[in-house]
Image (cartoon, coloured by chain):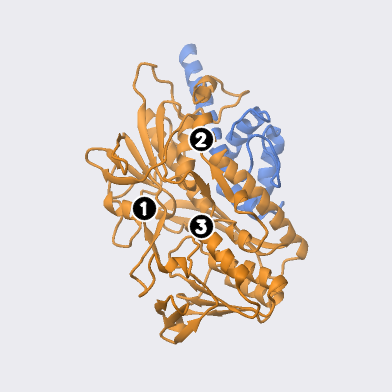
Amino acid sequence: MNCWTRRQFGCLAGAACLTAIAPRVAKSQPKARVVVIGGGIGGATVAKYLAMMVGTIEVTLVEPKPRYTTCFFSNLYLAGMRTLESLTHGYETLAQRYGIKIIHDFAAAIDPAGKTVALKNGATLPYDRLVLAPGIEFKFGAIDGYDEAAMQTMPAAWAGGPQTELLRRQLDSMEDGGVFLIAAPPNPFRCPPGPYERASMVAYYFKQFKPRSKILILDSKDSFFEQDLFQDAWARLYPGMIEWLPGQFIGGIKSVEVKSRSIETEGGTFTGAVVNFIPPQTASALAKQAGVMDQSGWCPIEPTTFESKLQPGIYVVGDAASAGDMPKSAFVANSQAKTCVFAIAAALTGAERFAPHLFNTCYTFLAADDAVSDAIAFEPEAGTIKISEILISQVGESVETRRQVVQQANGWYDAFTHDVFG
Amino acid sequence: MAASAFLFAAHDAAAENARGAELAAMCAACHRLDGRDRGIPSIVGLDQQKFTNLMEAFRSGKRSSQIMNVVARSLSTEEIAALAAYLAAQQKGSIRP
């Protein structure tokens, strides 16, 4: 089925050509091999667009999980507004329609000099270009007492799946009048509005079913993205329910105690009936092993190609990348992935390069009928990536405006996941 | 001369089409390119002039949409033209993503 793109190539105007970016090559010429590691939004987008728009490339996607549950919109699952199934996507279409070879295994080690990837099962994949989209990892050890075992009692729920289900079960079984503690991580971290959207959506659930309950956010920061929008919504929709304690008040999170479900800070110890501990984050260990991570814990990239600044021939997209002003969001991962695809096509096939366009949009729910959004355009500038245009929802918008954003958000989820997995 | 002029013209058309396809890929993050509308309007098969006028209105702010205002302001006139030609040439159901 991957020859769809090749069959369509000859057309100019008048036919379906979301394809025509690479020149023809003789059939006898061996296909260049691109291996993509990580089947989240960044990696799946790279694989799909390489296979769809550049038919002369053999694409392999390495992802351990058989299905992917989006982290974005998972707060709606916590609020009872979405099933987890509706947020879960398979890789069948990528394999069947676009001819991508999907390998459900872990990438164990990368050899940049030999240009190979060793898989956990022992196989070795040679590549001409490698794309890493490994996402984030938690910095276990940064907070005393918080490790993988602790996650089973105080879930992070910062990737869609079993952790999200665990947190929902805990919230379901919590008694009315309980305290839900959220520990929000220091910058940079995946999904800047995420912890505060979570507070809003859990408050939406509490308001209906456990109205005497409280939500306490212990923050590592003194401010957060769209703070005015959130604080306005909390006062309007959930008066007295949500309290946010900034870093300067709590003086930093020191340790956790799993048994008592408590968090110790400089300013005192806080205990919750349910604790959502979102730890400090870093790029995955694989990025470090591959030599694409710097001292910041993230992966510096060339802003017009997303090729690693540290390892030529290896590209990094998504949350693991350190990309100037670009936040760690699904939309950004998708946008970076497409820019990366066009750069790889140019490098491998001589396809013409055009100025890249990078965008972000985040939809953030405050209640079932109240959502806000932001739209940002970015431009490569002086070796990094800067914001060139930004518009964000405003406090005081009409009920109708907010309802329209909800409708748009749902339409976006459908189109976006179709763009990545469909 | 005539032959080389033709080749250049063909190259330009192919390049414009490739540029349109790349820009359309960016649009696909919100607009389904199979033409379905499930909350975000379809842009496939839109009349070239109508699309250009719409983008100009988004760019100037005459028409208000948070996301489209940002997108339109980040595109050049030439890019809008390439995108308009590309999308106008597509038919619903003809593009996979």
Q: Quadrant of residue A15?
A: top right
Point 49% across, 57% down: residue: A159
Q: How far is the residue under mark 1 from the one under mark 2? A: 33 Å
Q: Chain A is drawn in which colour?
A: orange
Q: Determine whether label 1 and label 2 are within 8 Å by CB.
A: no
**Of the image marks 3 and 1, the number of the one nearer the N terminus:** 3
User: Callout 2: residue from which chain?
Assistant: A
Residue corresponding to mark 1: A383
Residue A344 position within the rendered picture, expressed as x and y whole percent measured from the top left: 39, 36
Q: Determine whether label 2 and label 3 are within 8 Å by CB.
A: no
Between A257 and A243, the one nearer to me in the picture: A257
Secondary structure under badge 1? loop
* Above/below status of A398 relative to A249: above
Q: Indicate the chain coloured blue by its letter.
A: B
Point 50% across, 60% down: residue: A163
Residue corresponding to mark 2: A94
Between A261 and A24, the one nearer to me in the picture: A261
Dot in front, 2 or 3: 3
**Of the image marks 1 and 2, the number of the one nearer the N terminus:** 2
Q: How far is the residue under mark 2 from the one under mark 3? A: 24 Å
Dot in front, 1 or 2: 2
